[in-house]
């Protein structure tokens, strides 16, 4: 595997770097410089700037309005975005439901949904997990019963990330109770403004409203919103999850966070003992760097395979496991570097746009919020324990 960039790829890297340095919307750069979280409006501004540049559908084929980028170009883009500390692209529309629709949807669905997904005019969320169906997703009970030209949907979805912003939700629902439980699941697109849809917040450990419960009570959904065939939703959902798990690894962002840690070792916050001479701490830093480097080369092998037309296989589970473990290791290193600034944690200081409020410079990576929030990364997208079972089955044959 050759990891050197060609002249064309180096020119592309220069173009991407210039975009992040000079062309981000003011609403985005202002929040990034202030160390504030992205709100919905600035997130949409960012994604629409990518759309105007022709860079929204990073993993989409050209015929559906995507970039048609090679695996190497995608790798370059995400590394440059991480280097610039740009916001992550919210995945539910562009990276999840969009590819399902252009792969399995009919022509009318592609015409109806894909343009607004690509341009970020419509915000999507994911309806997979339920109170009693998370890792064992095939046990989901949200039911869609056919009634003429509609499905009547009843049930509840949970851990619905940013569902309070969403215009639409893509759901796995049960349309049959006969046969294998996986065969009775369908993939349905539901308007969040439909009568009978209720969204209730779940406040996470970092004090934020990021995830929600979504309740469906006799919600009418047109049959035309069924993607693909009834009863084939499990197949479509697995394809989506495979790509999601690869993205969860977050290698580019972790590389930038490790670089931040190295920079902070030489410039600790006032009143915090320096840790660069602490051999135990430095050993942990070096161990994390070794694991991250190995993870990056695993990702490059996956990208190389994808570039030949293959879909990610069990490698996506390997990326998910190790990628999330590295993220949590970095969180712990950041929190130790923060010292006394790690506590107390006041969530409001990361949302307040009052220019008189000055954040402690050390908190550029928001050490405490990252630590609290990222306890979940080994769980969502399929727990790491489930990923180990997938690897055992598909690689080891046990």
Image (cartoon, grey):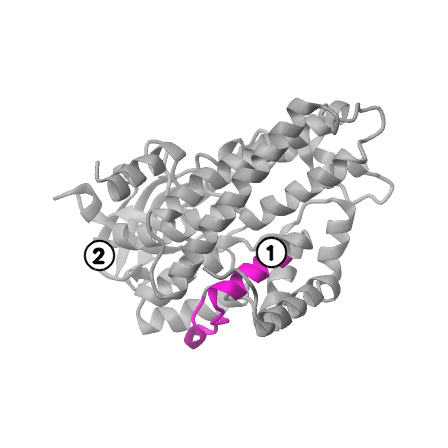
Query: Disc 1 on helix, strand or loop?
Result: helix
Residue 23: mark in rendering: none
Q: Residue at x 49, y 69 (%)?
A: 69
Please provide the residue range marked out in magenta: 60-80
Was residue 304 drawn as part of the magenta stretch in this picture?
Answer: no
User: Viewer-proximal residue, 181 or 154?
Assistant: 181
User: Viewer-proximal residue, 98 or 239?
Assistant: 239
The relative height of residue 273 versus residue 230 in the rendered view (above or below) is above
User: Viewer-proximal residue, 186 or 194?
Assistant: 186
The relative height of residue 243 versus residue 120 in the rendered view (above or below) is above
User: Viewer-proximal residue, 326 or 106?
Assistant: 326
* Quadrant in which residue 340 is drawn: top right
Write down the residue under mark 1: 79
Horizontal side of residue 344 vs 314, given as left or right: right
Horizontal side of residue 267 vs 160, given as left or right: right
Q: Main secondary structure of the magenta part?
A: helix
Count neighbours of disc 2 (C-alpha within 10 A) and say few if under 14, some if 14 to 19, many if 20 or more. Answer: some
Question: Does residue 168 appear anywhere in the picture?
Answer: no
In the image, farthest residue toward the left: 179
The relative height of residue 226 versus residue 108 in the rendered view (above or below) is above
Write down the residue under mark 2: 230
Image location (x, y in percent) of residue 120 = 55, 63
Horizontal side of residue 1 vs 23, given as left or right: left
Question: Does residue 384 appear anywhere in the picture?
Answer: yes
Label 1 and label 2: CA atoms lie apart by 39 Å
Do the residues under discs 1 and 2 have CB atoms within 8 angstroms? no
In the image, farthest residue toward the right: 356
Image location (x, y in percent) of residue 247 = 47, 50
Comes first in the chain, label 1 or label 2: 1
Indicate the quadrant containing the C terminus: top left, top right, bottom left or bottom right. top left
Image location (x, y in percent) of residue 96 = 42, 56
């Amino acid at each position: 595997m050759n990891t050197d960039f060609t002249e064309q790829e180096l020119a592309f890297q220069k173009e991407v770097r210039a975009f992040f340095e000079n062309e981000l919307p003011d609403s985005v750069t202002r929040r990034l410089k202030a160390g504030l979280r992205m709100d919905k409006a600035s997130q949409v501004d960012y994604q629409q700037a990518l759309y105007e540049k022709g860079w929204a559908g990073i993993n989409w084929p050209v015929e559906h309005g995507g970039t048609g980028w090679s695996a190497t170009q995608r790798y370059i883009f995400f590394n440059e975005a991480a280097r610039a500390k740009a916001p992550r692209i919210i995945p539910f529309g562009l990276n999840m439901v969009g590819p399902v629709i252009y792969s399995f949807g009919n022509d009318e669905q592609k015409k109806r949904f894909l343009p607004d997904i690509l341009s970020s005019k419509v915000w999507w969320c994911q309806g997979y997990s339920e109170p009693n169906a998370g890792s064992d997703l095939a046990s989901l009970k949200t039911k869609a019963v056919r009634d003429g030209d509609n499905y009547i949907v009843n049930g509840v979805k949970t851990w619905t990330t940013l569902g309070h912003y969403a215009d639409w939700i893509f759901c796995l629902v049960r349309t049959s109770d006969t046969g294998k439980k996986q065969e009775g699941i369908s993939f349905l697109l539901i308007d969040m403004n439909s009568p009978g849809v209720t969204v209730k917040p779940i406040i996470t450990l970092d004090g934020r409203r990021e995830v929600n419960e979504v309740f469906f009570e006799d919600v009418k959904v047109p049959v035309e919103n069924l993607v693909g065939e009834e009863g084939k939703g499990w197949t479509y959902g697995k394809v989506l999850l495979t790509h999601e798990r690869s993205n969860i690894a977050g290698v580019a962002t972790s590389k930038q966070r490790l670089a931040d840690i190295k920079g902070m070792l030489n410039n600790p916050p006032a009143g915090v003992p320096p840790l660069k001479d602490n051999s135990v701490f430095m050993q942990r830093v070096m161990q994390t760097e070794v694991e991250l480097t190995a993870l990056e080369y695993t990702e490059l092998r996956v990208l190389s395979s994808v570039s030949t037309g293959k879909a990610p296989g069990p490698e996506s589970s390997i990326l998910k496991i190790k990628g999330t473990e590295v993220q949590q290791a970095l969180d712990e290193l950041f929190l130790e570097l923060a010292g006394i600034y790690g506590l107390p944690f006041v969530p409001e200081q990361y949302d307040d746009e009052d220019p008189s409020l000055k954040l402690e410079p050390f908190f550029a990576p928001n050490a405490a919020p990252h630590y609290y929030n990222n306890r979940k990364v080994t769980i969502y997208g399929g727990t790491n324990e489930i990923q180990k079972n997938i690897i055992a089955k598909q690689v080891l044959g046990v």
